[in-house]
Image (cartoon, rainbow, N blue to C red):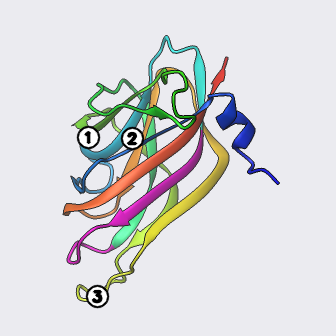
Amino acid sequence: MSGKYQRAAQEGRIFGVANQAAIAVTAALATTFTGLAVGNPAASGVDCVIVNMSFGNTVEGISAGTIGIMGAAGAITASLTPKNQRLGGPASKVTATGGQTIATPILYKLVGHSGTGAITTWRAGVVSCDLDGSIVVPPGYFWATYCFALAAASLQFSFTWEEVSR
């Protein structure tokens, strides 16, 4: 039996990126952004079909709140390198960053919650949301992590997507 993304991964169309360390995040729809953002350049020639978002809380004591995906038209300046999920596969056509000034985003989907509401009790483990291709990001747009509340350097994020020729 094979996984639902196995064929696309074997063909070198599945990509991912993750914060390499815990990162402080900005609250809600802030345009002075920190978290994880991925941009699909206007000239990329691909649609990015998001298949997964994951996040984990690395320390106790951050503000509790929802985590999700937001997006808008605009460019992302590269500071992180998306990787083909077929090791040794072709390079991604998109860019990624852990922070920059972005265009005013819109919240598209909530995928989880960080914390339980009590500062001394926190959920353990990584939250992984299978989006099953339900968000498509065309050239000239970006997607990014949404965090309801401001948090110190305590969260790590990852996105996985398929790049499909237009």
Please tell me whether residue 54 belongs to the stretch shown in magenta.
yes
The correct choice, above or below, for 149 with respect to 122 in the image is above
Name the residue located 51 percent from the left edge and 15 percent from the top edge.
Answer: 44
Q: Is mark 2 on a helix, strand or loop?
A: loop
Residue 115 numbered tag = none
Q: Which of 97 and 65 is in front in this view?
A: 97
Give the mark, 3 or 1, whose residue is nearer the N terminus: 1
Q: Which of marks 3 and 2 is in front?
A: 3
The three-letter code of the residue at mark 2 reads Pro
Q: Kindly identify which residue carries mark 3.
A: 118
Residue 41: image quadrant is top left
Contact (CB < 8 A) between labels 3 and 2? no
Could you tell me how far apart the alpha carbons at marks 3 and 1 are, in whole angstroms?
28 Å
Q: Residues within 10 Å of mark 2 (few under 14, many from 20)?
A: many
Contact (CB < 8 A) between labels 2 and 1? yes
Pick the quarter of the image with the C terminus.
Answer: top right
The three-letter code of the residue at mark 3 reads Ala
Q: Kindly identify which residue carries mark 1.
A: 31
Name the residue located 47 percent from the left edge and 46 percent from the top edge.
Answer: 159
The correct choice, above or below, for 130 with respect to 164 in the image is below
The three-letter code of the residue at mark 1 reads Thr
Name the residue located 47 percent from the left edge and 27 percent from the top edge.
Answer: 141
Span highlighted in magenta in the image: 50-64
Q: Position of residue 8 (x, y in %)?
A: 70, 34
Please tell me whether residue 75 belongs to the stretch shown in magenta.
no
Give the mark, 2 or 1, whose residue is nearer the N terminus: 1
Give left or right: position of 17 versus 4.
left
